Amino acid sequence: MSMIIEWLFPRSCFGCGRGERYLCDLCENKMKSGLLSHKKLFEGIISTYKYDGLMKEIVEKVKYGFVSDAVEELAKLMGNKLKISYPNVVKYWQKENFCLIPVPLYWQRKNWRGFNQSEILAKGLAEFLNLKCVNNALTRNIKTKNQVSVKNRQLRQKNIDNAFRVGDIKTIPKKVILIDDVVTSGATMNEAGRILRDSGTDLLWGLSLCGVQK
Ligand SMILES: [Zn+2]
């Protein structure tokens, strides 16, 4: 499988075509940083990168090009970025034993793509930052449209209402970092976060690879 992927997607920088990684240091440095914001449901929401330019291109390539090992590389980038930009938050998460939970994909979409990019990000980050990761805490009820393709904010909210429920898990962790690949309106993050908070999570953080800044 990995040989086929190497052949279809030779491992070189998405940005400049050089090197042996999907994203080289030079191109990574050119990408804009994300932000930290606070919402009631969450202690904080961090997007490590801004969803535009090269990062937007990469995320789209990964989603529609089925390049799961590129996501593993992105998880490391994200972990590094967090350690550099938010060292105290990372230390706090580690000290308090926060648990990473990915926003789930509908099973059909996961089967079609072969992987859930948020799940790979969560697993990779858990390893990189020495945190736990629980995959089955949430499940997705219905097939929702890709939020990025739903333009209107109200429609986005409608698209995601009641999309999640608690998965096959005995107790929902008390301290959770909810992770998604892209945060656009925040509707998906909010809806998944609300389920967690209603089901026993006391301290909730949101984390995404990239976000749209308003
Ligand atoms: Zn490059």
Image (cartoon, grey):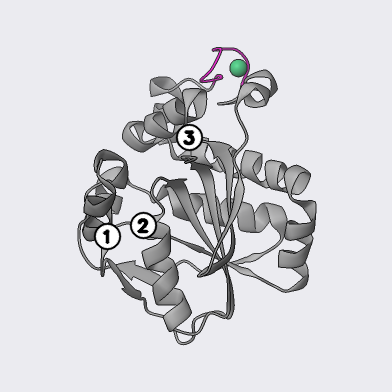
Q: With respect to residue 150, does 60 lie above or below?
A: above
- Magenta part, dominant SS: loop
Magenta-tinted stretch: 12-20
Magenta includes 13?
yes
Instruction: Determine crowd level at label 3: few under 14, some 14-19, many 20+ residues with C-alpha closer than 10 A.
Output: many
Q: How many marks?
A: 3
The residue beneath circle 1 is 160
Looking at the image, tell me whether mark 3 or mark 2 is earlier in sequence order: 3
Q: Is mark 3 within 8 Å of ligand 1?
A: no
CA distance separating discs 3 and 2: 16 Å
Check disc 3 and give the amino acid type: Tyr
Taking the image as four quarters, which one is ligand 1 found in? top right
Residue 12 image point, x, y percent: 55, 19
The residue beneath circle 2 is 187
Left or right of residue 187: residue 96: right
Kindly identify which numbered label has been placed on residue 51. 3
Instruction: Determine crowd level at label 1: few under 14, some 14-19, many 20+ residues with C-alpha closer than 10 A.
Output: many
Q: With respect to residue 134, does 84 lie above or below?
A: above
Is label 1 in a helix, a strand or a loop?
Answer: helix
Is label 3 in a helix, a strand or a loop?
Answer: loop
Camera-side residue of 128 and 146: 146
Check disc 1 and give the amino acid type: Ile
Residue at screen point 46% across, 40% down: 212
Q: Is residue 136 visible?
A: no
Instruction: Determine crowd level at label 2: few under 14, some 14-19, many 20+ residues with C-alpha closer than 10 A.
Output: some
